[in-house]
Amino acid sequence: MKRFIYFFLIIIVAVILSCKQSKKRQVPVIGFVDAFEDASIAPARTGFVDALKKNGFSEAQKTIEIEYSNAEGSIPTLTQIVNRFVSQKVDLMATCTTLSSITAAQKTKTIPIFMMVSPTVKLMQLQDTSGRANLFGAVEDLNYIDTSFSLIPQFLNPKSGKIVVGMIYNQSEPQSVDAKKRIQMLADKLNITLIALPLNSSADAQLVTQSLLGRNIDAFFANPDNSVFASFETIVKNCDQKNVPIFTSEAGLVQRGAVAAFGADIYQWGYQAGEQAAQFLKTHSTTGLQPEMVKVRKRVYNAAAAKKYHILVPANFEAVK
């Protein structure tokens, strides 16, 4: 009799858990993971959510559930977040910035991952024999860096001698190393002396930036690097103290103190990824979906920074607000 009661209780518990799980899955669940808190990349999340809303998926209307987590720059925390989403078997993951995308790709090959503010699969070195069939969203290659870096001699307009440009890069991030190599080749073509110093995390930014500024550079180039994003206020503070203007390939950094940029519109980047995610939620299929290049780029400048460094900005640049 006791065995029967015990067996009966097990069945009841299983039914309750099943009902809870069923209730939870009445609407699709998205696991959204940010690698760190950053004002420059925050618009990507807004764009992603807006694209879902336009396509009929809204938390307000209870047609979707979004579980948002931010790793605050901690790799162990980022891994825990992704592992949790995988164990919960969320319907899809949305990943913002390279570290989030790489971590998610390393942890699952079945849950669709919709990337934003991330480089191509090739640059992240995530290609394998499976073809990474679960990676989607909007990505960027390094071609736009050419235009961004080429702005420096146009803005500084040197009368004699070489321009000396400094940059820092995270030597543990593949896309940062690739960007550094590309920038070096471009600097050689433009007759620019490039001084690039490596670092291992944003915690090293102050020391490495100060070391770089001790090399008498004429300008600082903020390349697409998570450590640069996370420590940009420190970089700006140190560069301003030495009267060194900052140029960048990231439009979001202009609002935070860089002089000018040619780069992706971060809101539109997230929106583009959100449109793909919405298509998946409508069809329950990834057929026809693949990582696509970011579509909207813009030329922007910071009026206060341009004035500080007496830089005349061309008319085809838009002032950030």
Image: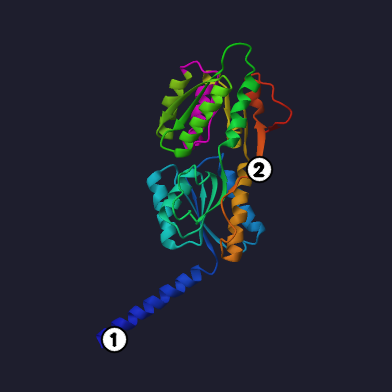
Q: Indicate left or right for 21 with 275 as reference.
A: left
Please give the residue where the numbered disc 2 appears in the rendered image. Answer: 296
In the rendered image, the quadrant that contains the C terminus is top right
Quarter of the image with the N terminus is bottom left
Q: Position of residue 137 (x, y in %)?
A: 56, 51
Q: Is residue 17 magenta?
A: no
Query: Mark 2 is on which residue type?
Result: Val
Q: Residue at x 51, y 50 (%)?
A: 95
Describe the element under mark 2 as helix, strand or loop. loop
Q: Position of residue 261 (x, y in %)?
A: 62, 31
Residue 282 is labelled as none
Residue lying farthest to the top in this orientation: 160
209 on left or right of 47: left
- Disc 2 residue crowd, few under 14, some 14–19, many 20+, Cα 10 Å: few
Query: Which amino acid type is shown beneath numbered disc 1?
Result: Phe
Discs 2/1, front: 2
Alpha carbon distance from label 2 to label 1: 65 Å
Instruction: Name above or below for residue 95 compared with residue 176.
Output: below
- Quadrant assignment, res 298: top right
Residue at image mark 1: 4
Q: Which residues lie in the magenta part?
A: 214-239
Which quadrant of the figure has residue 72?
Answer: top left
- Say above or below: 319 vs 241: below
Q: Is residue 267 left or right of residue 77?
A: right
**Depth order, front residue of 32/315:** 315
Query: Horizontal and vertical percent for residue 203?
Result: 41, 33
Residue at the bottom extreme of this rendering: 1
- The secondary element bearing badge 1 is classed as helix
Q: Mark 2 vs mark 1: which is more N-terminal?
A: 1
Location of residue 111 in the rendering, given as x and y in whole percent from the top left corner: 48, 59
